[in-house]
């Protein structure tokens, strides 16, 4: 995984955490759920890149 991909994935994960926290703080269930989806997507991308790195070793 390239450093740019790592940074991008971490930024997406952080954005999701911020959205989730903002949703919880304001009672906006839609925003909270959107944040959780962003985090899950980021984690899937990170796992996929780790698998690629393993096989390209």
Image: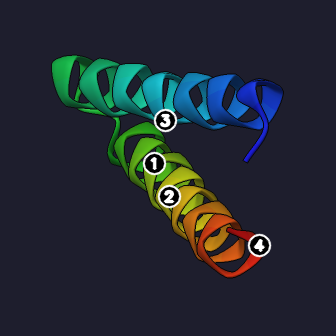
Q: Which residue ends up furthest to the bottom in the rendered image?
A: 55
Q: Nearer the viewer, mark 1 or mark 4?
A: 4
Mark 2, residue position: 37
Q: Secondary structure at mark 4?
A: helix
Q: Quadrant of residue 23?
A: top left
Mark 2–mark 4 distance (CA, rounded to whole Å): 29 Å
Residue at image point 26% right, 23% down: 21
Mark 2–mark 3 distance (CA, rounded to whole Å): 9 Å
Q: Quadrant of residue 51?
A: bottom right
Q: Secondary structure at mark 3?
A: helix
Which numbered marker is on residue 18?
none
- The answer to which of marks 2 and 3 sits earlier in the sequence is 3
Mark 1, residue position: 39
Mark 2–mark 1 distance (CA, rounded to whole Å): 5 Å
Mark 4, residue position: 56
Q: Nearer the viewer, mark 2 or mark 3?
A: 3
Label 2: how many Cα within 10 Å (few below 14, some 14–19, many 20+): some
- The answer to which of marks 1 and 3 sits earlier in the sequence is 3
Q: Position of residue 45 (x, y in %)?
A: 64, 61
Q: Position of residue 18 (x, y in %)?
A: 39, 19
Mark 1–mark 4 distance (CA, rounded to whole Å): 26 Å
- Disc 2 vs disc 1: Cβ atoms closer than 8 Å? yes
Residue at image point 56% right, 56% down: 46
Label 3: how many Cα within 10 Å (few below 14, some 14–19, many 20+): many
Q: Residue 39 vs residue 45: left or right? A: left
């Amino acid at each position: 995984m390239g450093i740019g991909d790592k940074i991008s994935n971490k930024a997406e994960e952080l954005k999701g955490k911020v959205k989730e926290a903002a949703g919880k703080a304001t009672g906006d269930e839609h925003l909270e759920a959107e944040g959780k989806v962003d985090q899950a997507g980021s984690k899937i991308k990170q796992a996929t890149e780790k698998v690629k790195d393993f096989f390209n070793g």
